[in-house]
Image: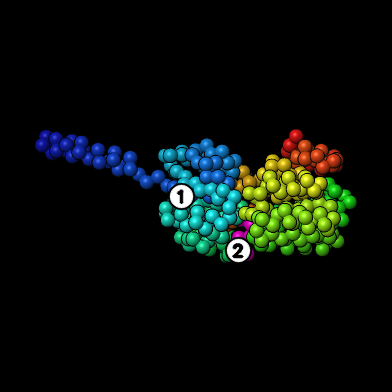
């Protein structure tokens, strides 16, 4: 090799190396916008206190992602105030994050805020009915992820009837966001010849009034259909149910952890862990329009034995044996 050419090549290589290093160090780290119903402080960092968000990050770690190196999060919490959802969705869109993961109650706000940023649904209540996707098999837009469709309201009613065999009238607490679930409850009750009392909420300020109506109508049990309004009020609802000595069935274990009697529904931590698979596919170039929406496959029955004792209720052995967890 020509000596002058060799020395020139070494010099060029030496000059190029720092530029290459700088290029590598400034590599864009993808950002995941995450939305939650609670406090933002519970969603921050690689080990968030929120169990669902922790499950998402564990799912990403299981897929080989390192927080801070392969991705970062931009978390925003609704603080139990549904009126904040539109502004939080708009904020993540302005930040131009690479993908957004959000729970069911916040998805309509995201639908209005963006038609381009991929959104992974962490438990949509009714993605087709809400206009989030065209179909479960072919979403057709920027939304994909996991749906809560197929979580049988009828099964919850059956369990409630098994817990309270003499329950002639079951009150149902719901709001417009959960209209499909209320209709499912109506259909299940008609099929089985059960009586329901509709307690529709238009505002969280109506919760106490709804319990007064249930007491006045002498309801024997309560079914709470989860939504963006009822979830942040889990503790209050549990306290009102206990005060009215009303055995209550919920769709999410968080209500039981807050003092509710029993829940049967999808495992939310599993849903958020599974959401990581969708994020991974989108990071690798998949179009959310072509990623089929998944439905939950893991359900859990959780019973609060302390609440049962407070209500003077004996849980049938047949139900205890089927429980996934008993809270003492």
Residue 89, percent from left and from top: 50, 55
Q: Which of 312 and 162 is in front in this view?
A: 312
Residue 247 lies left or right of residue 226; in this view the side is: right
Identify the residue at horizontal 58%, vertical 46% (top origin): 38
Identify the residue at horizontal 51%, vertical 63% (top origin): 112
Residue 201, percent from left and from top: 69, 59
Q: In this view, does 287 lie above or below 311?
A: below
Note whether residue 12 is visible: yes
Q: Nearer the viewer, residue 314 or 284?
A: 314
Determine the main secondary structure of the stretch shown in magenta: loop
Q: Residue 130 carries which label?
A: 2
Span of residues in magenta: 124-130
Q: Nearer the viewer, residue 205 or 55?
A: 205
Residue 280, percent from left and from top: 49, 47
The residue sitting at the right extreme is 166
Q: In this view, does 182 lie above or below 322?
A: below
Q: Which of marks 2 and 1 is in front?
A: 2
In the rendered structure, does residue 13 fall within the stretch colored magenta?
Answer: no
Residue 147 lies left or right of residue 214; in this view the side is: left
Residue that label 1 marks: 283
């Amino acid at each position: 090799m020509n000596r002058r050419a060799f020395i020139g090549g070494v010099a060029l290589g030496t000059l190029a190396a720092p530029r290459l290093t700088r290029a590598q160090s400034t590599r864009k780290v993808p950002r995941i916008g995450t939305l939650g119903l609670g406090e933002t402080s519970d969603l921050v960092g690689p080990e968030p206190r929120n169990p669902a968000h922790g499950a998402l990050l564990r799912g990403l770690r299981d897929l080989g992602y390192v927080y801070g190196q392969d991705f970062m999060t931009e978390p925003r919490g609704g603080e139990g105030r549904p009126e904040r959802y539109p502004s939080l969705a708009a904020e993540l869109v302005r930040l131009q994050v690479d993908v957004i993961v959000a729970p069911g109650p916040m998805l309509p706000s995201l639908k209005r805020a963006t038609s381009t940023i991929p959104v992974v649904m962490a438990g949509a209540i009714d993605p087709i009915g809400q206009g989030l996707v065209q179909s479960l098999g072919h979403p057709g837009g920027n939304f994909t992820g996991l749906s809560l469709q197929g979580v049988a309201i009828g099964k919850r009613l059956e369990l409630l009837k098994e817990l309270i065999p003499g329950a002639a009238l079951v009150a149902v607490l719901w709001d417009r966001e959960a209209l499909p679930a209320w209709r499912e409850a109506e259909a299940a009750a008609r099929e089985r010849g059960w009586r329901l009392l509709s307690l529709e909420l238009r505002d969280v300020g109506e919760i106490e009034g709804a319990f007064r109506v249930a007491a006045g109508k002498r309801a024997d049990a309560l079914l709470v259909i989860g939504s963006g309004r009822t979830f942040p009020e889990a503790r209050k609802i549990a306290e009102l149910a206990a005060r009215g000595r009303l055995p209550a069935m919920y769709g999410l274990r968080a209500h039981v952890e807050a003092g509710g009697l029993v829940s049967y529904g999808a495992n939310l931590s599993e849903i958020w862990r599974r959401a990581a698979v969708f994020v991974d596919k989108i990071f690798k170039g998949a179009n959310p329009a072509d990623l089929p929406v998944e439905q939950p496959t893991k359900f859990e029955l959780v019973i609060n034995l302390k609440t049962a004792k407070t209500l003077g209720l004996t849980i049938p052995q047949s139900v205890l044996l089927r429980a996934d967890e008993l809270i003492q």
